Amino acid sequence: MLSRSLFGVKAAANTRLFSRSASAVTTLQTSSPAPTFPRSAFIRSLANPYATAPALAKAFVHIRIRLAHSTAYSMDQAAPTSAAKRKQPPSSNGLDRPSKQPRPSQNTEEEVENDDSNNKPYTNGFATPATDAPNGHTSPNLMIEDANDDEGDDIVLPTGTADTAEWQATIEKVVRNVVSIHFCQTCAFDTDSAISSEATGFVVDAERGYILTNRHVVGAGPFWGYCIFDNHEETDVYPVYRDPVHDFGILRFDPKKIKYMPLAALELRPDQAKVGVEIRVVGNDAGEKLSILSGVISRLDRNAPEYGEGYSDFNTNYIQAAAAASGGSSGSPVVNIDGYAVALQAGGRADGAATDYFLPLDRPLRALQCIREGKHVDRGTIQTQWVIKAFDECRRLGLSAQWESEVRAKFPKETGMLVAEVVLPKGPGHEKLEEGDVLVKVNGGLLTQFARLDGVLDSSVDGKVQLLVQRGGQDVEVEIEVGDLHAITPDRFVMVAGAAFHDLSYQQARLYAVTLKDAGVYCCEASGSFRFEGSSSGWLVQSVDQKPTPDLDTFVAVMKTVPDRSRVVVTYKHLRDMHTLNTSIMLVDRHWHKQMRMAVRNDASGLWDFTDIADAIAPIAPVARKANFISMAGAQHPQAVDIIRSFVRISASMPIKLDGFPKARKIGFGLVIDAEKGLVVVSRAIVPYDMCDITVTIADSIIVDGKVVFMHPLQNYAIVQYDPKLVQAPVKSAKLATEPIKQGEQTIFFGFNQNLRPVVAKTAVTDITTVAIPASASTPRYRAVNLDAITVDTSLSSQCGSGVLVAEDGTVQALWLTYLGERTGGHSKDVEYHLGFATPALLPVINEVKSGGRPDLRILNLETQTVQMSQCRIMGVSEAWIERIEREDPERHQLFMVRKIDAGNSSNLQEGDIILTLNDHLITRVSHLDLMYTNPLLHAVVVRKSEEVRVQVPTVPTSELETDRVVVFCGAVLHRPHHAVRQQISKVHSDIYVSARMGGSPAYMYGLAPTNFILAVNAVPTTDLESFLREVNKIPDNTYFRLKVMTFDNVPWVATMKKCEHYFPTVEFVKDAGQREGWRRVMYEDGKVRKGVGEVNGVADEGGAGEG
């Protein structure tokens, strides 16, 4: 079974990933370092023509000794276990932050491309396994080296007999031409995800600066990268050509940038690839070593390997050899003993079999010659995929003995013929060719090889070809028009409403056997308004706002007419299921993403040129609507179930991931607390912060916009507001109980299940206890602390994330809320808890909000835990205090101990203190702590180290805890450390906290990971965002700079990064009540504020979170 690892696609078991980005391909082992030999000493010995035999023998003995000590190699990391089409963002595999030391691991891929496209994190250009870095992200890579080896980089040699002196001389010449390519595919496009990765290439034209590598390295979309030569000189590289089908691409560099070594090129000799030829694969291994692997060509007629979904080569044969190439070897030259490149490394098996697949160089050589001559590389197609089938299979398909005899006579070494595998509907070959047709002749000549077929088609673009095929034993002659392969390979895309679109590519259409004509516009990044359920890619949008969108131009024309904040009907299909037409209603976001932008590939510059093609249309003023709530006629308690008129559905969409929140969209229900003012209370697991779009749906009928009015810093609720004038429905303000519900009390549970349907059940309160929502170690985010939680005796409570506990007369006794908890280690799932929250604690805040105020609460910046009397007695609480507690609170014989003090808190309390009183009030319940909200200073009596101590405790204004300024720089989302960070860390290292980063960005490429703190820029201390912006705006574009960084676990390191304003401009968001969205944005270009509105491209990844 064949399966591919590239772009995160699931593969079969017992396999190994070869892609560089799949892991840290550091040469790690179980007991001793990998077999290495100092490159400089090794080359000096071999390069010296007068080297004595003993000297050479000594060198090889050293190699053999190192090989003898070698055990197992761990080349790659575990493959994804879900059959996702696109590459998934990196995920944290554990609750704790692992150490920075990489560890060996196993993989589960069978046949993969030797690329770096599994979207694993990188540090300074090198891969580090997500499981071995803080928060599942990168940290500085650690290589295991010989402590006494200080003579430069090492050459990793394959185990086995040492190479001859002739081979070593060849390798010495070849290695100078091999480069390590570090690159970003800056956004999702066609089959490619946004990734940061590493691969190999080699110089094929030293004068013009051309490098040959794989197409899956160059990618179909925007590319940004650089290469490092053997002497560690570095230069930028730009795409010159990527083949529409075959797995090769050509990069350009400036030869003048290489100053310290003579440049040379490898000559391409596809004619010297023959069965039995001994070869070497010279490639990149983890960016620090040169890997030289030996093998022997065993086949020349293998079909192109299929890697599953995503990009795969086709319509070419592949060369097979036993070389066991490792990760990062994509684009490596396959050389013979004469030093000629005879093939291009592309893929291989990863199930333990030492089998690799190389691309023949016929077509790369032709493309290189065209580019050298300044000619366009013509590529023809009849939109038909062919495969090589052996003669016995061809006979079963109907190949006649006569034709077999003629073919064998003319091509005595051939063992098969080309057979049609996929004929695209409505393509040039449709209704002329059929699957299973055996190709006999092209333009009157017998033909059995892909290279000749490619040659005929490439020379016949916009012309016709004559084909003779055998179909069930009958000759069939057809004349087919040859199309332009480049014309059906997208070279532009549009970004609108937070998503990206382009025409369907031949690559995708061929994979799923669908037509290219009027198939719909392909959504390559399903985010923003077009965040479809189930997958982030593979969607074909069929219509928007009841208007067909068969192609990109039509789609752009339709979207130009849709006003901001409109709700339109969208129909779409997935490539995996073209039978099903899905329908959704979409809120068009043209305020967070104001501009519609077109990106067009520019092969002259190697960049993609961006143009604003349409401004947003102002939203249409909403009008009032009428509606009625459903009735629940079968309910036994009509006054209680009438609470349905106090519930509205809340949908929150977050344009940027902040504060460690894992989702980009959440849906739940809120309780209307004031129908006249349109005030609704809702869980902060649904509305996590105020940079969001809130949609309020009343009676499942009326849709209006909402805005955040208040967010409680501790108690997991927010208050949002909608315009009640737009709602003509019998919405009822919920009546909230003023007395707390008791344990054992009968009540009615009313909630909404996973299907968003109301459910009701008579139940009883089983417990009311102080709980602590577990912290998420890998990604600190908002959680409720110091909480009295209610549990009830009904299974519905675990099924419903929103609801109430209501008395028979309709009085709401408690809210039923969703609490966001920790992230599990095994599957990186976010745990949610469903618990009750008594309504009396809401009343002070709600009453102030109802009166038009904005509560500015003050809190004790600490986390507590309950201690029972037995513990209190041991910790020094006197018998007099214990008797007072039992007397004054017979239901709760407990006190609170300070478990954790937030970082940066100047409180006089200490961890381990047991709180007795605050302002002379005995503290035995969480509700007793509410007096902190209005007092800037509290007088506390605590037991500290068995002694009773009186201290003054200042409270902290909560206005300082919410994020009010965000900077997106080089793809990293930066803001002040939010409250959850301060709760979990002992020291706040700076006010510049990395909350998220975007795939394919410099932040991702150079390992600036979420939960890092930035301390300085180019050795200039930057304590806050203002000083950070001042320093980074001094840095010219495409220039390296240094960041002093501190990890969450107090490990300092220095990141070197290169600025990339073309794809990742600097954008600042500042909270501004004068703006409709509540935020103002500023875009910087060349260090200055740019006129216009900044756009943020890409989907942020906050360290393992999935999409909402």
Image: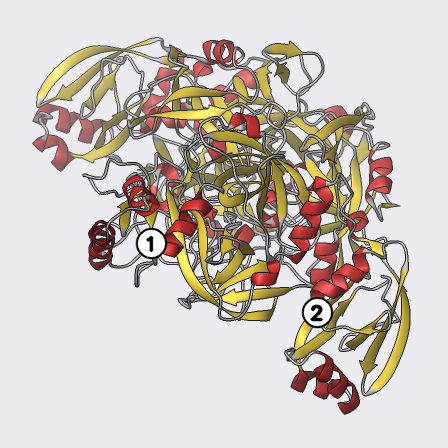
Element at badge 1?
A: loop
Q: Amino acid at mark 2?
A: Gln
Name the outermost residue toward the front: 50
- The residue at the point 44 percent across, 45 percent down is 173
Is 701 or 587 nearer to us in this picture? 587
Q: Quadrant of residue 600?
A: top right
**Residue at the spot of label 1:** 157
**Residue at the spot of label 2:** 449
Left or right side of 762 for 901: left
Left or right side of 426 for 734: left
Element at badge 2?
A: loop
- The answer to whether any part of residue 962 appears in the image is no
Q: Is residue 465 above or below residue 990?
A: below
- The residue at the point 63 percent across, 10 percent down is 1089
Left or right side of 502 for 927: left
Q: Is residue 312 above or below residue 958?
A: below
Name the outermost residue toward the bottom: 401
User: Residue 434 appears at what percent x and percent y?
Assistant: 81, 74
User: Residue 705 appears at what percent x and percent y?
Assistant: 70, 29
